[in-house]
Structure formats: C-alpha cells, structure tokens
Amino acid sequence: MAGEVVARIRGVKKYFGATKALDGVDLDICANEVHAIVGANGAGKSTLMKTLAGEHVPDEGSFVYLDEDITGLVPLEIQKKGIQVVHQVLNIVESMSILENILLACPPTHGGVLNWKEGRAKVKETLDFIGIDFDLGKTAGLLSVSEQQFVILARALVNQPKVLVLDEPTSRIGWEETEKLFNVIRKLKAHGTTTVYISHRIEEIYQICDKISVFRDGKRIDTRATRDLPKDELVTMMLGKKIDAFFPKTQLEAGSEILKVTDLKYHDRINRVSFSVRHGEIVSIVGAVGAGKTEIINAIFGILKPEAGEILVNGQPVFPNHSPTKAIQHRIALVPEDRAAQGMIGNYPVKNNLTAINMKNISRNSLIDAKKENILAQELNDQLSVTPNDINYLIHMLSGGNQQKVVIGKWLADAYNLYLLDEVTAGVDIGAKTEIYGLLGELSKGGAGVILATSDIEEAIGLSDRIIILYNGRVVKEVDPKNTSKAEILSCIMGDEKIAQ
Amino acid sequence: MRNNMDKYIRAYAMPLGLVILAILLQLVFIKVPLFSGLNIKNILLETVSISLTALGLSYIMMSGEGDLSFAGMFSLLTVVFATVSNITNNFFLAFLSVAVLAVSVNLLIALLVTQLKFSSFIVSIAVMFMAFGVEKVFHQQTTLIQSPAIRSFSTIEFGLPLVVWLMGIAYLVSFFVITQTKFGFSLRIVGENKNAAIEAGINVNRMKITAYLVAGLLIALAASIESTRVGAIYQQGQFYMLPIFAACYLGSSMFVPGRINVIGTLFGALFMGVIQKFMNMINVQSDIVSIAQGVILIVSVGLVAFRNRSKIAQIKL
C-alpha cells in the first residue's frame, strides 16, 4: 500500500507566544497514499498544514521533501517543488474569470507576456482530469460555493503536484460533489500523487483514507492504517477521553405549536414549503447544498423577504414588515451558517460578542454597566466552557468550535422560543460537537423549539424528533428518525422520487 | 446571445452616455462650437494632465490602496517645475527634479503603507495638506516660466500635440502591461483579493510599492506638461482633485462594476475634459463647476453601487 517516504517531518516545534501549537511533531508522508490528519480543534492540524505550505517556518525541527531539506522555504518555492495546499477558506478572486482564477499562481507567459491560449489548454486538461466542465470565461464570483471549491482544487492541480494537502474540502459541498472529489483523490493516487486529507468528518475519512494520523495538543499521538483503527478508538484518541453518549437522549412530550410555516415561496429557492414546530421539539431540515435550507431559515428570521406564504409564531403572523429585529422580539434566535460573516464580530473580545444582543440586561438608562457586562459574559463563558476561559480574548483567535460556542452562547442569556441553527456543527470538532448537542438537548428540555438545518444526516437522525427533507426547494418528505434509515434519507435528498413516495 | 448584448451594453454604457450627452449639449447650445477641430484638440490638450494623473491613481487603486496626495503634490510639483526651469532653463532638468520628488514622496507613502501598515487614505491626506502647505510657504504668488522654449513644449505638434501623443503612449503601454503581462495580472489580483495573492505566492508589498512608483512618474509627467501648457503657475492642483477622482470612478463603472481599469479611466478623463470645456465655454463660474463635478463623482460612485447591488443579489441568493 505505502510507497517510499515523500515528505519527512522531524521534531517540528512551533510556538505562538506562550502557546505551543506544534510540540515536536514527527510525521512521514509516503507516496501513493491518502493520509488523514485528524484531531480536535486546536490540536495543531492547521499549523502543521501551514508549515507544509511554507506559511509558517518551524521554530525547531526539519522538513525534508524528496531527500531535500526545504525547511524555511517560502510558499511559492514549496509550490514549485510540488506541494500544493488547498485551504479551507476559498480565496476566489470574485471579479475575475474562472480561467484567471485557476491560473492565479502560474499564468503561462512568454517573456512576461501572458499566453491565455496555452493556459486555457492546460486548464482544460486539469478540468477533464477532475471530470468537471466550466465556461472558463465566466466570472468566478457568480459560481456557487461548491463550484468554487472545484475551481480552487483545479488551481492546486493545474501544476500536477506530488503532494496535495486538502483542508476540510467537503465542509461546503454536497454529497454528489464529495463523491466527485473522492474520485479525483482516487485517480490522483493511481497517478502517484499523495493526498493529505484533513477533516472532521470521520465517515469520510474511513471512506477514502489509507492511513490516519491522530493529533492532540500539538503532538502526533499515533499513525495507523485505517482498517486497524476502529472509529470509537479514534474518537477516544482524538479527545484523550472516552465519550459515552454522543447524542443526548431526551424524550419528552412536544407542547403546543410555536411555529407554523404555510406555503412559503421565494423564486425557485423555496417552493411552497409548509411545516410546523412545537415547543420542546427538535426538527431537522436536511437537503443537499442549494436545496433551500438557509433560505427557509433566513425567511423565518426576517432576513429574506419571501414572495408568498405565511409564517405564524405562537399563532401571530409575522408578515408584513418582518425583520431580524422583529424576529428577536418574537423570541427567535439565529445561529447563521456563515459564522465569520454573520455570526460574530471578528475583531472584538468574546465579552462583546456574548453581550451584543443582551444590551438591556447589562445597561441602565442606555449606559452600559461594565461590571454587569463582565459578570454576564463570565457566566455565559463558564456555562459554555469556552477555552481559553478569558472573556477579553478576541473571538477570531479562538478555534472554530469555541467560536461557535460563543455564537450560540449569546442567545442563552434570555429565554427564546425558537432557535434556528444553520449548519451549527460545520468545521467543529467532535468534542465541541458533543457539547453543542448537549446544549440543544437542554434548550428543547426547557421548552424551546429548535430547527436544525444540516447536511450531516447522522446528526439529524441522532438529535431530532422529526426530519424534513428538502429537494430543490420543495419538502419531499417528513420522516421520523426512529424508523428511517440513513440510506432512505440520503436517497430522498438526492431527489430519488420513488423512495420519497 | 441576449446575455452577450447585455454585457456589451453594460460595459459601454458610460462611453455611449458620454457621446449622447455631448451631442445633446451641442444640440441645446447650438451656438457653442463644442466639437470643432480646434476645440477637440484643445480638449485633448487640457485633458492630458488630468488623464495622466488619473492613470497614476488608477495604478494605486488597482493595487487595492487609495490616494489623495495627488492634489497637493500636483500643485507642489508644478511650482518646483517652474522654479527649476527658471533657474536652469532646461526642460529635462526641471522634469528630472519633479520626477525625483514625486517618486520619492510616493515611495515614502508606499513604505509607510506596506511596511508599517498605515492607512493609505490617512497618510495620503496628510501628504496632500503638507504639499499644499509647502507650496504656499515658498510661493505666495504666481510663478511665471521665463523660458519661451520650455513654454512652447506643449505646442509641439505632429498632427496632434506631442503631449497628447505622450498621453496616448502612456495609456497604450499601461493597457498592455495591465491586461497582457504577468505583472499586471498579479497587480490586479493583489487589488481584488489580497489573501488569494499571498496564496499564489505574489509579493503583495512589492506590487503595491511598484504601483506607487509608477503613479509618481505619471504625476511628475502630468505636472510638467501642465506647467509648460499654463506657463503661469498658481495652485494648479486644487481644481484637479475632483475631476481626477471622477475619472477613475466613472471608469470603474465600465466592465466589472467597481474595478478600476485603464480604458475606463481614459474615458472618464475625456468625459471630465469635455464637461469642463463646455462649462468654460458657456462661462459657468468656477464654484458651479466644482459643484457639477461633485455631482458627477457621486453619480459615478452611485452607478457602481447600483450595478454591484444587482450582482450581490445574484450571488447571495
């Protein structure tokens, strides 16, 4: 299975101030393998990846690639050696064409003059390899996020790298695209390219990876062949402790109806959608990327103005003049899909992020009471066990899971009737995930209704009382997770009408 | 097909509007010969310094920074040009001194912006006021350029005035560099998405510094030409701030909304030239001229915002 060692990392240490991000890491990456790097948030995966890319120079240790010491080379030089990193953040130049975006780093030139004809041929070849067809002149900003993911992939593959590092490549794409990506990875392996695959999605790792290296607290704990490492052992290794109940089992009687959506319509994104949610109920909305989950959530929260339909909250219609302010007055809370853009105030301390929507609780006569603010923030922070436990820490310095806890936590200071959670566990490690699941259980126990828009079917089955399946903006089916299999839900999501009926 | 038509109409709406507006003006003010041969030449001649400075500003804006220093610098540079040419009686020495000054000031701004991460907007405002101040300390009144040889520089003609040819060459070269070379491609990436540029291994700071240096050269050329054309120098820069900005922003409404581009800036500058000439010809007061220019600037920014709004709606939902 494994070929010779391509990249050899020895004793790499990296410090950020007093924090040890990498604490003496040894790692061998071999030819012709798909090598998974797993670990909880903050385990050092991203730092390791940035070290591979040349964006971080290790404080100690060496990085040898094909018997050549390349420690301390700049990213461009490392790219030229044949190591390509696909970052989690999609750095698309929105106003440029797909062609230009793919050839960003290496446009073919003759004496400094660009040669797009040659570039076009090169790009066509790469896209054929991936098995995707783009109108190369189209502006990249008009593409969907999952299409953009493939543009970025093509950007990495256009120079035929020997090592491809993928950081959470499936966090923004649907199942069909994931399958396509896996095909590319298999093809690359057949062509002798090694893939380093970083993901929180354990299912995927078992599907595609040959080897798993587990990281924790800046150290590599172990590397094993995938078939020799059972899933529960992997999770224990990642977290350094055993998790007993992954999904909290809360069985309770649903109360009165809190939300009723009737015939909601928005262009072709939401097509005559009706459903309801009761007090104490967790309802999942599942569907492929672009099925309309986020649109429905946004319509309920007043961000998106639907063309037709009615939304009743506790029996009261919210239209006309619905808005986020009104939604909050109706005691609706939102945890948005795009955490960085909509969920948090990036350059501000955890404290302000927690209290921003709770100004009434911490102010008197419109003046903020700093003492009250600190007390409230500290209470919430303790309740959520955000690490580090420091309310003055800037939120964008936290790991993804901890950021998400803060984003959810701001809604915990007051009681809300309905929680709208959009891809709440995307990019969140399994430890923080479990904590978030526990929190949802608490909320529904307290009598709140929860809508969970998710593309993670296991999560939907494990957590919810009912699952609403969307396909192309329509509700295909509503199922009871207790007597529905994952495969059934999956085929409904894929638009398999026969099973749906 | 319909999409293609739509694309072209959007891209060329601005120059088309320019032509229609000019024709309308001509029809309404039938007695004013706005487009006689002589007038077209004069409009071009008067637009040379605006369009060269706007081109320089475009480089800076394409690299993702902003600049206001050009207004003050333009004033200062014209005075320096006049003074040096009166001392030396040599066009090239005068130009050289102006170029050295402009390039070093821009280098200083660029270093502050790239190395120390100062806000380019604030730094350049400071430089603008400093340049105005320095100019006023040394020159309370009009400076005349003595040498008739230097004064006649802008009257040299080969079919069109030499300086118009120079402007044309500057634009042609810039168009080629920006659209057809790796340097131009990298510069645009830096301006559009800095993180993508870093990932692509582009030296962002070097690109920005280069943009500032090119801008310095272009403004030096613009100020020299302006000095020889006017002959009597007194606070030349203050009337140019608005038209130069307006040229860039009008230009950015062509093609991809909000993206500064060479062709757009040229059309924007010519448009501002025509408007200014027209207002001169019907004897509009200078205060009213600046009000009109302000309106044009707001309209052009509004055009970009309006076109972007539809684009954003398309992407987000």
Image (cartoon, rainbow, N blue to C red):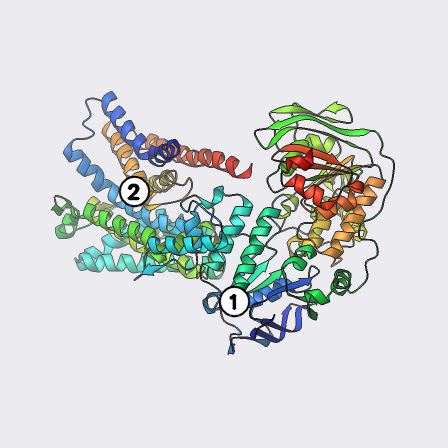
Chain identifier of the residue bearing label 2 in the image: B
* Residue A187, image x, y percentages: 53, 60
At 48% across and 44% down in the image, what residue appears?
A141
Residue B190 picture quarter: bottom left
Q: Which mark is residue B291?
A: none
The residue marked by circle 1 belongs to what chain? A
> Residue under circle 2?
B266
Q: Is residue A184 left or right of residue A107?
A: right
Quarter of the image with the C terminus of chain A is top right
Q: The residue under label 1 is which amino acid type?
A: Gly
Secondary structure state at the residue bearing disc 1: loop
Residue A346 in picture, x, y percent from top left: 63, 50
The residue labelled by disc 1 is A192
Against A262, residue A78 (above or below) is below
Q: Which of A268 and B99 lies nearest the eye of the viewer?
A: A268
Judge the density around disc 2: few (<14), some (14-19), many (≥20) Cα neighbours within 10 Å: many
The image position of residue B169, as x and y in percent, is 23, 50
Q: Nearer the viewer, residue B79 or B228?
A: B228
Q: Which x, y percent locates residue A232?
A: 77, 60
- Amino acid on which disc 2 is placed: Leu
**Residue A470 in view in this figure:** yes
Tell me if B135 is positioned left or right of A470 in this view.
left
Question: Which residue is the extreme one toward the right?
Answer: A252
Q: Is residue B124 visible?
A: no
Q: Which quarter of the image is occupied by the N terminus of chain A?
A: bottom right
Q: Which residue is nearer to you in this view: A170 or B32?
A: A170
User: What residue lies at 50% left-to-right and 64% top-to-bottom?
Assistant: A191
Farthest residue in the front direction? Answer: A498
Mark 1 Cα-neighbour bin, 10 Å: few <14, some 14–19, many ≥20: some
Q: Are marks 1 and 2 on the same chain?
A: no
Report, in whole angstroms, how far the alpha carbon at label 1 lies from the one at label 2.
51 Å
